[in-house]
Amino acid sequence: MFSRQKKAQSISEETKVIDRNNIPAHIAIIMDGNGRWAQKRHLPRIAGHREGMQTVKKVTIAASDLGVKVLSLYAFSTENWKRPKDEVSYLMQLPIRFFNTFVPDLIKHNVRVTVMGNIDKLPKDTQKAVHDAIDQTQECNGMVLNFALNYGGRDEIVDAVKNIATQVKSGEISVEQIDESLVSANLMTNMLDEYEDPDLMIRTSGEERISNFMLWQLAYSEFVFTDVHWPDFDAKTLEDAIIEFQGRHRRFGGLTK
């Protein structure tokens, strides 16, 4: 799966034309590099997270304007609880600050908020901010802004297996009925319907791994890795990643003529 991965390379000016008819429907982003961005500027790590929040706003609007159907952002993983307590506390406040200031703009741009992950384990005020944003944008029918909060790909698959096992045990389904569609229906992305699997996955800040993100859904996604730290990511960087995607030949395990 990883043999086709490569860093997003600079593209000559004459080829930097985005094809508006070939925009990836679902883009997933691992937003990496907030801490490194801050450290390079001799700032505390939380300064990077604060700036990264502003980047989320800019990139959300840019993706919506391009016609992206779903933008999934890996905001907080199940492993992120291992970070220093002060940093975790700050990260738990970011959804509150983000939604309190940005929901009106989301509604203006017809963007609907969804969240996947174990939300019940987040602090109560963070949970409230998340549920309020979901409720306030539920009538929007444009792009879906899907946050992964307290999310882990392995946990998601384990939960899906448990759900399916329970259905088999209760007699609702037989073992023979278990297939890829049934597994997908029991994953957290089932709410995204036809767009549940990302077409393009972007990771910022130079790391080349998926870090327990959408392990099932990324099976045939195109990967673009960029050295740009998340706070420096912008509409232009997003377009460059999409242009890179548009230069790929997606075969889904088959052959092209």
Image (cartoon, rainbow, N blue to C red):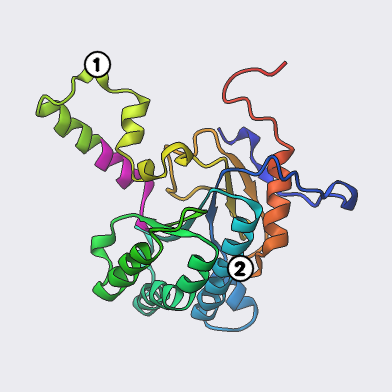
Residue at 60% across, 65% down: 230
**Residue 155 is covered by the magenta coloring:** yes
**Magenta stretch in the rendered image:** 148-160
Helix, strand or loop under label 1: helix
Label for residue 176? 1
- Say few, some or many: other residues with alpha carbon within 10 Å of mark 2 (under 14 / 14 to 19 / 20 or more): some
**Residue 86's spot in the image, x, y percent?**
37, 80
Q: Residue at point 80% right, 52% down?
A: 10
Residue 168 horizontal/vertical position (percent) = 15, 26
Q: Residue at x 64, y 50 (%)?
A: 225
Q: Position of residue 51 (x, y in %)?
A: 57, 76
Q: Residue furthest right?
A: 14
Q: Quadrant of the N terminus?
A: top right
Q: Quadrant of residue 91?
A: bottom left
- 43 inside magenta stretch: no
In terms of image quadrants, where is residue 98?
Answer: bottom left
How far separated are the C-alphas under marks 2 and 1?
Answer: 47 Å
* Left or right: 99 in relation to 45: left
Q: Is residue 35 visible?
A: no
Residue 173's x, y, as percent? 18, 23
Name the amino acid type tagged 1.
Glu
Is residue 257 positioned above or below 166 on the image?
above
User: Which label is found at residue 58?
Assistant: 2
Name the quadrant containing residue 62: bottom right
- Residue occupying the far bottom of the picture: 43
| Magenta segment main secondary structure | helix
